[in-house]
Amino acid sequence: MAGKNWILLGAPGAGKGTQAMRLVETFKLPQISTGDMLREERRLGTDLGKKAGEFMDKGSLVPDEVLIALIAKRLGQPDAGGGFILDGFPRTLGQAEALDRMLADKGRRIDRVIAIEVPAASIVPRITGRRSCPKCGAPYHVQFKKPKVADTCDACGTKLVQRGDDTEAAVVKRLEAYDTMTAPLFAYYQAKGNLKKVDGDGEMDAVWTRVKEAASA
Ligand code: AMP
């Protein structure tokens, strides 16, 4: 198998977070989710969190320089030395190029990009139905992955929450940002020969089988 510096690419709501959690368990790699990192900064009330929050609530991308600095720091931590799963980064060509430079400086490279593709029509209901556990992070969906007890985490019993930017208005903006800024990354990684496209439509377990195959191939 090739090296394990991996990217999960896909539209908001394509199931990146859920599949990333499974990749983490199976391949014992750290998941690096820039969305989670920014939400944590907001929760802590840091300057970075406050600045990022203004963009996030609108469904806009946070400026590249903020994300590039954040990811450079994270990739420098020891647990990322043996590989990683990037979830939600890069989202622009500028970020992808900065990432390549950052890795090249350490004699590393992106080994694989797993792109989860879902039909545009299924994205909005996927996102607006999302819920998650604020304590342990477990993901749920009001239609596709119901908890055993309504609104309650199966794993730890905490009341589930909806992300502030999972509303219809913010989702429309996030999808626009994806189409204009992030979709060009498919061609960028295709040209480098490390893009693996995965059909993200259908049951989570079926998608996982395909993601695992793409990761292992
Ligand atoms: P996510 O949880 O990945 O959907 O990210 C939530 C929000 O955080 C996005 O809508 C952006 O506002 C911001 N964000 C996360 N990752 C990035 C990134 N790589 N570039 C710019 N903004 C980002």
Image (tube, rainbow, N blue to C red):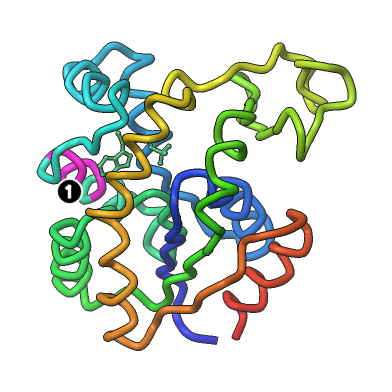
Q: Is residue 5 above or below residue 137?
A: below
Residue 211 pos. (x, y %)? 63, 69
Quadrant of the drawing holding the N terminus:
bottom right
At 83% from the left edge and 17% from the top edge, which residue is drawn? 150
The quadrant holding residue 160 is top right
Q: Seen from this angle, which residue lies furthest front? A: 121
Q: Is residue 109 above or below residue 71?
A: below
The quadrant holding residue 149 is top right
| Main SS, magenta residues | helix
Is 183 covered by the magenta stretch? no
The quadrant holding residue 175 is top left
Label 1's element? helix
For residue 64, side relative to residue 73 (left or right) = left
Part of the protein shown in magenta: 66-71
Residue 187 pos. (x, y %)? 29, 76
The one of 89 and 115 positioned closer to us in this rendering: 115
Residue 13 pos. (x, y %)? 53, 44
The one of 62 and 25 positioned closer to us in this rendering: 62
At 66% from the left edge and 55% from the top edge, which residue is drawn? 22
The residue tagged 1 is: 68
Residue 213 pos. (x, y %)? 66, 78
At 74% from the left edge and 69% from the top edge, which residue is drawn? 209
The three-letter code of the residue at mark 1 reads Ile
